[in-house]
Amino acid sequence: MQLSATSYDERLTAPRSWWLISFLVGLSMALILLPFGTLPLLGGLVGGTAVAAVAASSYGSLRIRVVNGSLIAGEAKIPVAALGEAEVLDREEARAWRTYKADTRAFLLLRAYIPTALRVEVTDPEDPTPYLYLSTREPERLAAAIEAARTAKAS
């Protein structure tokens, strides 16, 4: 039996406001270089904007995927057979699990600009990680994809 290539794929992109901030960083660099002339001013605008945009893009470009029986979250790859119950977290519960309910041994794929999350138990006795906390814009779909991959893997 061949599993589907990808049953879930989400890119955690940076919010639009970060791109405005990137431009403002470039503008501030341009203002700093204003006393040196027009060419340094333009270089500061372009260079500062580019560096800030690359930083925003690299921080905000993580992916969460469920592919061929594995959950890939950022750089972590976990077989779905090692995962237990998935709990969809709304805004308030996600905040609680990021703060006072958090376990220091947990794997957190945390992006503060995404209010909802999914908490997935790790059932592998060899793994000291108690759960995965995954910031996601579509926690219901991710939970359904993990469950579908687990069911397909068991068949």
Image (tube, rainbow, N blue to C red):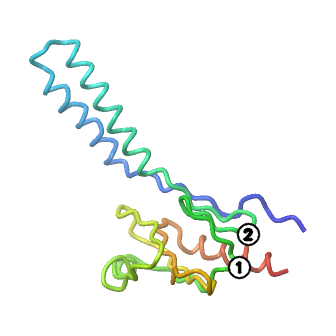
Which image quarter holds the C terminus?
A: bottom right
Q: Amino acid at mark 1?
A: Ala
Q: Residue furthest front?
A: 126
Q: Quadrant of residue 22?
A: top left
Classed neighbour count for the residue bearing mark 1: other residues with Cα under 10 Å, few (<14), some (14–19), many (≥20): some
Residue at screen point 21% across, 16% down: 40
Residue 102 placement, left or right of 155: left
Q: Residue furthest left?
A: 35
Q: Quadrant of residue 97?
A: bottom left
Q: Amino acid at mark 2?
A: Gly
Foreground: 74 or 150? 74
Where does residue 66 sit, x and y in percent of width and height? 66, 65
- From the viewer's perspective, is residue 55 above or below residue 119? above
Where does residue 12 sit, x and y in percent of width and height? 48, 56
Label 2: which secondary element: loop
Q: Quadrant of residue 6?
A: bottom right
- From the viewer's perspective, is residue 68 above or below residue 12? below
Classed neighbour count for the residue bearing mark 2: other residues with Cα under 10 Å, few (<14), some (14–19), many (≥20): many
Residue 81 has which mark?
Answer: 1
Q: Find the distance from the CA under tag 1 to the CA under tag 2.
A: 8 Å
Residue 28 placement, left or right of 13: left
- For mark 2, what is the residue? 69
